[in-house]
Structures are given as structure tokens and as C-alpha cells.
Amino acid sequence: MAFPTHIVSAGGIVEDGKGNILLVKAHDDGWVYPGGITEIGENLIDGVIREIKEESGIDATVSHLVNVISNTAVHKWYDGVTDVPTKVMFDFVCKAVGGELATSDETSDCRWVAKENVLDFISLPAIRLRYEAYLNFNGSVNFIEYATTTTSECSVKLQREV
């Protein structure tokens, strides 16, 4: 039997306690909240905390899970050649506990943005969808399935609370 290939990643919607959300400007994706692929042997919480620190310089703790997302499309990576397999993503609400804003090899800018203004920065449809689910969070985890054919297109297949 061949095992399926999935990318597992975690995103951190980091709150500063003053009504602001941490955004980073990724080289390929524009403004997003921090996150990325978990490493071999790494759990989701350690992965999202590491990604937040690497991409922004901010130390954070995880508060709670808000979204479980499946991107069931196979699409091309930024190189236009490599296939990106199905992705399973977990978005956590996080609290900033220290550190200083700093860019990295993956980011060209980072800043705190008022929670109500974040969507003015995010242009990727899939990230907008996930952030909107965070804004509408009522205590039940959101399950979202979508398919991306390109980074600028997102077709929602399913969205519900679980």
C-alpha cells in the first residue's frame, strides 16, 4: 500500500492584547499571518510557535485552535514545476508574550495591525477566508475545505463548525 502524501502546517493568528494582530509580509504571498510546514518530529504547537518566532521575531503561546483546513487541490509551487500535494492546516489563536519585531529570510516586513483592518492587508483568497473564520469564531472549531488552482484562486467546497 502506498501512503498518501500530505503537507501538514500550522498558522498563528497572534494577538497582542491591545486589539492588534501580527502580520508578516511573505516574499511570495504578500501579507499573511505567520505559519508554515511542521518539521519532521515536530508537533503542531511547537511548529506554530517556531514559525511565528522565525518569521517575525515574536515569542508567542498558543491559546486555542480555531480552524482545521484542507486544501484538496494539487497545484504548482512558485517554481511552476513542482506539484504541491494536499495540505492539512491548523490555525491557532496565539498570544504574544515577548520578542521584538524582526524580518527573516522568509519575510520582508512585519507589523501589528488593528484586528478590524487586517483584511485591508491580506490579498490571498484562502488566507482571507481563514482569517474571516477567525473573526466569526464562536467557540466551535471551523472546518474548511477548499481547492486552490493558483495562489490567487480559492474554491470553497465545505465550511462548517465541528
Image (cartoon, rainbow, N blue to C red):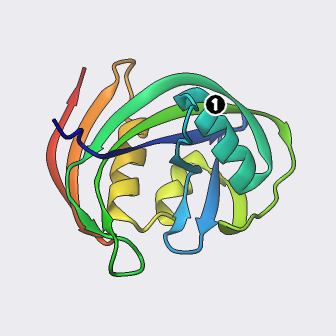
- Total number of numbered discs in the rendering: 1
Q: Residue at x 80, y 50 (%)?
A: 57
x and y percentages locating residue 23 in the rendered image? 62, 56
The image shows residue 44, relative to residue 33, as above or below, that is: above
Looking at this view, name the residue that lies furthest to the bottom.
80
x and y percentages locating residue 161 in the rendered image? 24, 25
The image shows residue 30, relative to residue 144, as above or below, that is: below
Towards the viewer: 18 or 142: 142
Towards the viewer: 25 or 28: 28
Looking at this view, name the residue that lies furthest to the front.
1
x and y percentages locating residue 92 in the rendered image? 51, 32
The image shows residue 114, relative to residue 67, as above or below, that is: below
Q: Residue at x 74, y 46 (%)?
A: 53
**Residue occupied by mark 1:** 46
Q: Is residue 32 left or right of residue 161?
A: right
The image shows residue 105, relative to residue 51, as above or below, that is: below
Name which residue type carries label 1.
Answer: Asp
Residue 133 found in image quarter: top left
Q: Is residue 42 left or right of residue 87?
A: right
Q: Is residue 121 left or right of residue 100?
A: left
Q: Residue at x 46, y 58 (%)?
A: 119
Q: Residue at x 31, y 30 (%)?
A: 142
Q: Is residue 6 left or right of residue 95?
A: left
